[in-house]
Amino acid sequence: MAEAAALQLRGIAKGYGMRRLADGLDLQVAAGQTVAILGPSGCGKSTLLKIVAGLEPADAGRLFFGEEDITAWPPERRGFALMFQDFALFPHLDVLDNVAFGLVEQRLSRRMARARAAELLRRFGLQAHTHRRVWTLSGGEQQRVALARALITQPRVLLLDEPFSALDAALKDTLRAEFRHHIAQAGMATLLVTHDEAEARAMAGEGWRLDQGRLLRAW
């Protein structure tokens, strides 16, 4: 299972020219907790996720997971999963191999990776789609595949970037409930960024607004 430890941001700063996207941000996300960061497009939410994931460096500040300073760690060492709003599934792979991909990358045998992927697909109600190409699935089905792929490696932290923005309202409600259930089962720290306050409140027990580089408590 994912290691039970908190994600901590301490004094994170990031800017482009005169524009400050993050101005000394402090935030803690406990194991099993979902924290939401709200704000309009372009305010720096996605950049902050990329800093946490290790895809982009901060100008200043430190990142910790538990007692470990992970600021300089590359993405693959952090063991975090980042789920984008456009799903980022592999069109040349079927559903099973999309979900198994992360385990294969971790050097698990393809046979074992596929067996674990098949079990997770069963839990997600996707067993009938195992050998379909992902581009033949509905938006909701693709989103479930993307979550299964994110969770199969048992990440220490789950990072969600506008996960439901492309879906209709009824499907959003269903998937929010499913995501809450699967995230709670996995017991990992989860950081959600979104411009949709209803989505944030449905998913997260704690919410913040990113406003001119600063975090303001929303609830």
Image (cartoon, rainbow, N blue to C red):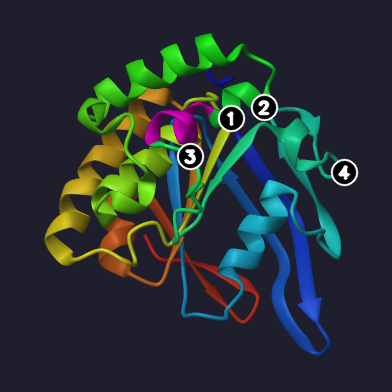
Query: Disc 3 marks which amino acid?
Result: Leu
* Residue underneath mark 1: 102
Residue 26: percent from left, percent from top: 67, 55
Is residue 7 left or right of 41 when viewed as pictured?
right
Residue drawn at 65 percent across, 62 percent down: 48
Badge 2 crowding class, 10 Å Cα cut-off, few under 14, some 14 to 19, many 20 or more, is few
In the picture shown, does residue 43 fall above or below 4?
A: below
Q: Amino acid at mark 2?
A: Glu
Q: Secondary structure at mark 4?
A: loop
Percent from the top left, x then y, of residue 65? 69, 33
Query: To which residue does mark 2 refer?
Result: 105
Which span is picked out in magenta? 95-100
Specify which label sits upstream in the sequence, 3 or 1. Answer: 3
Which quarter of the picture shows residue 12?
A: bottom right
Q: Residues within 10 Å of mark 3 (few under 14, many from 20)?
A: some
N-term-proximal mark, 2 vs 3: 3
Q: Nearer the viewer, mark 2 or mark 4?
A: 2
Q: Secondary structure at mark 3?
A: loop
Q: Amino acid at mark 1?
A: Gly
Distance CA(mark 3)–CA(mark 1)? 13 Å
